[in-house]
Amino acid sequence: MPTPSKSNTLLWVSLAFYLIARLCQLFADHLPSLFIVVLHVLPPAIFALVHATRLYRLRGMAVFTALCLGVGGLSESLSLRTGFPFGHYYFTTVMGPKLFQLPVLLVLAYLGIGYCSWVLSLLILGTQPLRNARLITTPLLAALLMLAWDLSMEADWATLDRAWIWTDGGPFYGVPITNFLGWYLTAYLFYQAFALSRYAIPTPPSHDFGQGFWQAPILLYLICALGNLLLPLQPMAPPIVFDPTGKPWQTAHILAATSAISLFLMAPLPILAWLRLSLTSNKSRHPAHLLTRRSRS
């Protein structure tokens, strides 16, 4: 396992590469699409592996990775063949090499944002042991953070970029509502399984690792949200696009919806996690019993 200093370096380097990936969207007409996809997927995945190894040790990191990729990959494969849980769709060549019709990079994409969503849910609800109601509410909130991510980018990647095609279209700019229901279910299942595996095992308090360690996943999720605001500035697609049913959708409307969801749904969640982290850190520096003594003196 890398030393804390090496881990911190890897975390911030991965974060920097992810920021570069979001900026690369502005040059989509000059850069290979697969290169942009790789930069979107690999840095967050590496970030998740390094951060989880420090937080949960190698065993905990392996359990989270296996559940996230296993449940995610199984749901995608099942839906490709049966339409459950997401709906009927297929992948194009945009996301690169496939294994059994499923792009490898697509499965890896679950890991980076999936792990950051889990950490943010811990920070928002508190890092106490996962007991009683927290055993359920933490996975529910983490799944909501994952759903917010999918909701923000789905129409852009599917209807505009055509990384995957919804064969029957759908009311959300060519995307079926079943996709979002299936996404939430899939995320909840692997989060709940991981929560059960961590039952009654406390996550170390924030001050055990330092604020920077906890701030890093907050920043990655926030970069993801704010990066979507750059999409209207990228080389424009045709003003009108058509889903497979022939229904027209205005590109400007899709990009406006992506920006609105990113700004008003995604972005407030890492900001809330940051505020909760700051509050926890202040309490750890000034324990209640010391404040009481000082007030009496």
Image (cartoon, grey):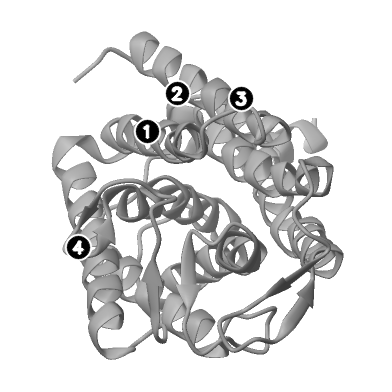
First in sequence, mark 2 or 1: give its number: 2
Q: Position of residue 175 (x, y in %)?
A: 59, 80
- Relative vertical location of residue 109 with respect to residue 256 in this rendering, above or below: above
Q: What's the residue at 56%, 82% (across, down)?
A: 244
Residue 51 numbered mark, or none? 1
Between label 3 and label 1, give the one nearer the viewer.
Answer: 3
**CA distance for labels 2 and 3:** 14 Å
Between label 2 and label 4, give the one nearer the viewer.
Answer: 4
Left/right of residue 25 with respect to residue 34 in the rendered view: right
Q: What's the residue at 63%, 36% (across, down)?
A: 219
First in sequence, mark 3 or 1: give its number: 3
Asked if labels 1 and 2 touch by Cβ distance under 8 angstroms, the answer is: yes
Q: Amino acid at mark 3?
A: Ile
Left/right of residue 143 with respect to residue 169 in the rendered view: left
Asked if labels 1 and 4 touch by Cβ distance under 8 angstroms, the answer is: no
* 102 or 214: nearer the viewer: 102
First in sequence, mark 2 or 4: give its number: 2
**CA distance for labels 4 and 1:** 20 Å
First in sequence, mark 4 or 1: give its number: 1
Q: What's the residue at 13%, 42% (across, down)?
A: 59
Q: What's the residue at 51%, 30% (across, down)?
A: 207
Q: Position of residue 194 (x, y in %)?
A: 26, 63
Q: Which residue is mark 4?
A: 70
